[in-house]
Image (spheres, rainbow, N blue to C red):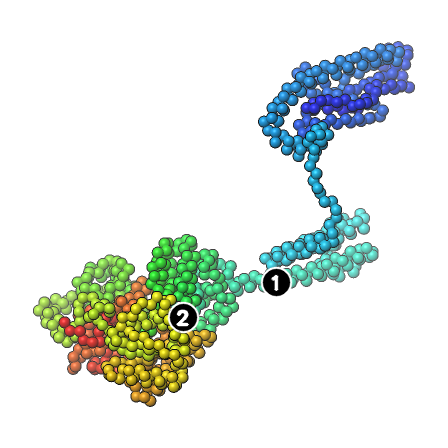
Amino acid sequence: MILCQLQSPQPWLLPPRISRLTQLSSCSAARTQGIRGSNNRILFQKSMLCSFWWNNSSSNHAHNSIQYGGKQKVTIQRATDNSECVSDNSNVKVFRMDLQSSSQVQDHLTKLISGTISSFLVVRLIQLGFVNTLMKMVQDLFPYIHQTLSVTSLPLACISNSLNKPRPLNLDVSLPSIQDIRWNFARLLYLFNIQMEKNVATFLVVLLVACFSFVVIGGFLLFKFRGSTQSLEDCFWEAWACLCSSSTHLHKRTRIERVIGFVLAIWGILFYSRFLSTMTEQFRNNMQKLREGAQMQVLETDHIIIGGVNSRLAFILKQLNKYHEFAVRLGTATARRQRILLMSDLPRKQMDKLADSIAKDLNHIDILTKSCSLSLTKSFERAAANKARAIIILPTKGDQYGVDTDAFLSVLALQPIQEMESVPIIVEVSNSNTCELLKSISGLKVEPVENVASKLFVQCSRQKGLIKIYRHLLNYQKNVFNLCHFPSLTGLTYRRIRRGFQEAVVCGLYRSGRIYFHPRDDEVLLQTDKVLLIAPIHRTAKQKVALSDVVKDETNAVQSLEVFKNNAETPTHALELRKERFSNIVKRPKGPGSKASDQSLGPKECILLLGWRPDVVHMIEEYDNYLGPGSVLEILSDVPLQERKRASSLSGQGKLKNVQVTHRIGNSMNYDTLEETIMNIHNSIKKDNHIPLSIVVISDREWLVGDPSRADKQSAYSLLLAENICNKLGVTVQNLVAEIGDSKLGKQITRIKPSLTYIAAEEVMSLVTAQVAEDKELNEVWKDILNAEGDEIYVKDISLYMKEGENPSFSELSERACLRREVAIGYIKDNKKVINPTPKFEPLSLAMTDSLIVISELEGEQPIVL
């Protein structure tokens, strides 16, 4: 059979040699039907099959000749009337010819075939002319596409077109070297080990796949060697039995089965050993992740998050423990134990050790630890920050810029979290400028707490006993600051409210985010105002939670005062009381004064400061705010003068107005050096006996390196050494103060030497932070009290408020202090402080050596008479 492909865009080329189209065959058997004569006839059958098709991808012609039992079939595509191709194997007419007229029939057949082919070629040429014209137009429009397709898509394009030569592939069919095979194998192991480091379960998957493969291979081998005596399923099951139990292969009979069973048993032993080790390692990794807590999602509500670990953490946790203890007693707590989530970038094992050492005596809080980065949003999301009660960010670096930068990054990490508007964020920063920057971040409720430890230290070093008052006001077991809202008292004047509370001291009003310690007596309480009280927490908490009973008591007290006012406080009587009070007090200006004004110049003092560290610059500025002109501040330390000047320039210290600073090089623990320094100062102020001398010891920079307890011991030693030298030389010292962080050591020293005072400024600052975490509005109160430009707590002589021989009540002393624009919160009698004394209308037996504790804008030890 000759297969001719005629519908090709290329010219149709006939093969150079065509085999004969006819073949004669003789038949020995006579046919019973269709016999036209007596002569033998030969059936001459010629089947011509014409099949033509259009090929878009090739211009080649394939010629195939197929022979079937000596017969040849020629396939030719015939043109129909509508120029369509019939590709089915259709048989042409069968010609039967006699052997005698075979020559005539052959000539006639040749003419018929020639005419058919000629007519078909004419029709095809007409069709190809149109197709070639169309293809030429496409080639002219898109020459590049045509060239690319003809080169890349035609595997035999070079046969029909010599211009489109195929591009050589340049394939390297050589076998790889042994070194390349080793490198590829090592690369495969390397990728596998990387995946193993990411997830140990990868090895478990490999073991399972290998186990399944051994079972399948072993089952097929057993099935092959056993023939059809056992099914394939039973062979698989027996292979699995050999893999699971190593003794199964002992029951095999043939040698081949024993070998297969032995291999499966050995692999089973290896498989189970590696399987158990992998499971153990995966469990260990999961437990390690749980211990680290970095990826653990916290499912807590009403918890407190503390970010960062520093020296003040222990005091904050103790303060929170005390607060929750009272909350449980009052029934205001939502849980029996308060959950505290401690977050830090330290290893979790170190954090757990620190938490256990702190919380071993804290029975009302549970501490959870989480090792993570505080600058990532994901860390706070996993800590459920949007469901927390409060978030406290503690500084972990010593320098000023590092503290503020970390605080800013932590607050920025909290901003993308949803529903953070109601969660207070307490952040400790180093200066007031950073406070304003953090408050400007939208979507967050940020309460920056400025680290005023240096200011607090200066205040307490100048007033003996002031540190005890601060500790009292920050101890939840005693009287503390509270902001309470009393809707039923709306519309009453401040005078009636101030006199109406008998179990608390009214200190001022909280209005529009600001605290006012000295509102006018005729100021009316608004609906949104809060009253600032000093009272035990169990009383104020009841007022916040169960106002129905407490407000009735307070309203009754106010109504009783109203009756007292109508009956006793007539205008004439009130005027007489006011005149009497003015006659018994030392007057001061009514207008708001300032510590920098000429009318309120501070006292002239001499201070010896033992030790140096960078924040001493801030202490010097605070001394300049409180002291008057002519004051002297001398610093004794081993730190070189050049480094001290560098610290002053970096902090931007301006020119001092009232204090003259002198520096001395020496070790404060050296007896001779310290004695010489004290003698020189005493000789310099000996001319003016009215200048008091104070000796202040701070932790030196070198002492802070290493164990913090070492710095406390060296501070205590320098303080005791200075006290011994002063007693030996007969030098009178007003205040002997040392900075000691360990309260136990400080109390032990003060018990031995009552004249000495220890100040734990860092502890007090941590107590302030913890109190602000419970009530963010108290931040404004402490910010005003600890600022030199605001109202502060002073211990003043009782002679400013009473005359000798009087026995006024505390309520009367409060009224007299109010005339001086001060708030009396307690008194000191026989070196014992009493804050919020009750009852307030009983007479007090106070001596002229006692003191009154007030909140005042001016220090005012010196009388100021109008």
Q: Which residue is mark 1?
A: 281
Quadrant in the picture for residue 859: bottom left
Measured from the top left, where is residue 409 in percent x and y? 42, 59
- Observer able to see residue 775: no
Q: Residue at the location (66% across, 19% down)?
A: 129
Quadrant in which the N terminus appears: top right
Measuring from the top left, give residue 70's x and y in whole percent.
85, 24
Mark number for residue 819?
A: none
The x and y percentages for residue 382 are 47, 58
Q: Residue at x 80, y 16 (%)?
A: 94
Left or right position of 724 against 565: right
Task: Give the amino acid type for the residue marked by disc 1 in the picture.
Answer: Glu
- The residue type indicated by label 2 comes to Arg
On the question of residue 264 being in view, the answer is: yes
Q: Are marks 2 and 1 in contact (CB under 8 Å)?
A: no
Image position of 664 (left or right of 830): right
Residue 542 spot, x, y in % from top left: 30, 66
Q: Could you tell me which residue is drawn at 37 percent across and 80 percent down?
A: 747
Q: Name the front one of labels 2 and 1.
A: 2
- Res. 312 mark: 2
